[in-house]
Amino acid sequence: MMEEFDLIVKGGTIVTASDIYIADIAILNGKICLMGKDLTCSAKKIVDADGKYVLPGGIDVHTHLDMPFGGTVSSDDFATGTIAAACGGTTTVVDFAIQPKDATLAETTEIWQKKAAGKAAVDYGFHIAITDMKDEIMAEIPAIIEAGYSSFKLFMTYEGYRVTDDTLMKALKITKDHGGLVCVHAENYYVIDYLVKKFKAENKIEPIYHALSRPNLAESEAVNRAIAMAELVDAPLYIVHLSCKESLAELKRARDAGFPIMAETCPQYLFLDEDNYREADFNGAKYVMSPPLRKKDSQEPLWLGLAKGDIQAVATDHCPFFMEGQKEMGREFFAKIPNGAPGIETRMPLLFGRGVRDQKLTLTKLVEVTATNPAKIFGMYPKKGTIAVDSDADLVIFDPEKLQTITKSILHEHVDYTPYEGFELKGYPIMTIAAGKIIAEAGSFVGKAGAGKFIKRSAPMIL
Ligand code: URP
Ligand code: ZN
Ligand code: ZN
Ligand code: ZN
């Protein structure tokens, strides 16, 4: 006798990183159970996806939910942030668990597990951001990888968080020896420190000086240095939020020479630029993040880098702060503006509704950089990141004809602005399905807080 499925998504155009074809998807117990044309089995619910695109749910491998940072706390917690993710077509997040001073890595994982438990509406994992790398901490790395936290982030800048080059090199070595992956925030601390102090002395305090104190070369020099250290210890490396053409050139050089160096960029570096910092009335503070927005001449190289496979992923670096009460802290000095901006809900819509529409990305490439590659690099594939029998039933359905203008009022991010206000899109997510359940529909969240599960991640695939 034919079993009854929980859900069948019928007649949609399925897009994976390699194929586009029409098929039905039958789902049982949170997994894709059967796929084929014109399935006749019965199901508790049928979703008609005729004329729509069905993509693997987005995987955002760079978020900062409920994170103490810059003298305040990012304004989305695991409840609000994952609701926003769901409404924007993202069904898995990998957040950064930041090691508090004097905490062990094991304690760090506990702190972040508590933040997410009972709140997250989509599945989640954690990278461990190591801020205090004593020998005892280094010794914890193998057990942490074993427990499902197979990636780490090290900061080359930020007072209080940054590590020195010898520490980075040791971390690269031990992580590689135990089958994990180091992610690096690459900016030259001393260059930035020098320029920030110089601008302050000259009373140059407005948001534009945030960008001018963190020039492209401050990033690309650090990218080059991190790559050199990875090469020296024969370790893979993942560069987070790569923002400019000079850093891309370093990445390409290393990849062309055969080194296992990977990188993500973020929508803000593809769609926004340095001129945003000049918006009147302190509105430039909305875009204060690190690395900063760049001049427009980095945008085409980054799009091309994605299209050609030099850059493997697009993540958001979602780290929202309210203008009121948070960004405002830096009205008298740009260096006191908390660094970070929202984007968890707009990544998939922007890349589809502008990136694909404007032929910067093909549909299969969109899937590759937002789901398949992130799942592979961070040890979640093929459970996540594709549409196939036995994979998790995490899907996003796009209406390719839907015209939507982004405004703060349609978004669910817990913050008082969006950097993409007024962006006009063609194509928008109309339904998000996670673990076989509809969690967002027609712009509203219809899932459950706490339904998301912790994803124990395995070894990285090197792309
Ligand atoms: O400005 C940013 N990016 N804030 C979040 C922390 C980080 O560096 O990723
Ligand atoms: Zn079956
Ligand atoms: Zn960073
Ligand atoms: Zn970040």
Image: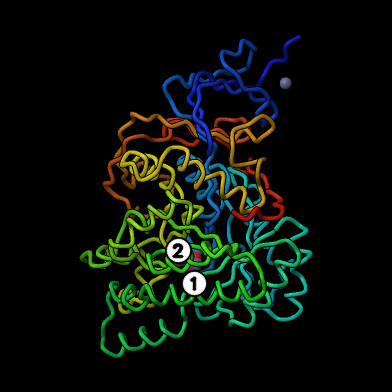
Pointer 1 and pointer 2: residues touching (CB < 8 Å)? yes
Cα separation between marks 1 and 2: 9 Å
Note whether 5 is above or below 317 in the view shown: above
Q: How is the image coloured?
A: rainbow
Residue at point 38%, 78% (across, down) = 335
Note whether 106 is above or below 272 in the view shown: below
Which label's residue is closer to the chain start, 1 or 2? 1
Seen from this angle, which residue lies furthest bottom? Answer: 201
> Residue 337 location, x and y as percent?
38, 72
Residue at point 66%, 35% (across, down) = 391
Task: Respond yes or no on whether mark 2 lies under 8 Å from ligand 3.
Answer: no
Amino acid residing under circle 2 = Leu
Q: Secondary structure at mark 2?
A: loop
Which label number is shown at residue 223?
1
Note whether 418 is above or below 25 in the view shown: below
**Residue carrying label 2:** 242
Nearer to the camera, 259 or 262: 259
Which quarter of the figure has residue 300? bottom left
Residue at point 54%, 21% (across, down) = 23
Residue at point 35%, 75% (across, down) = 215
> Residue 127 location, x and y as percent?
63, 60
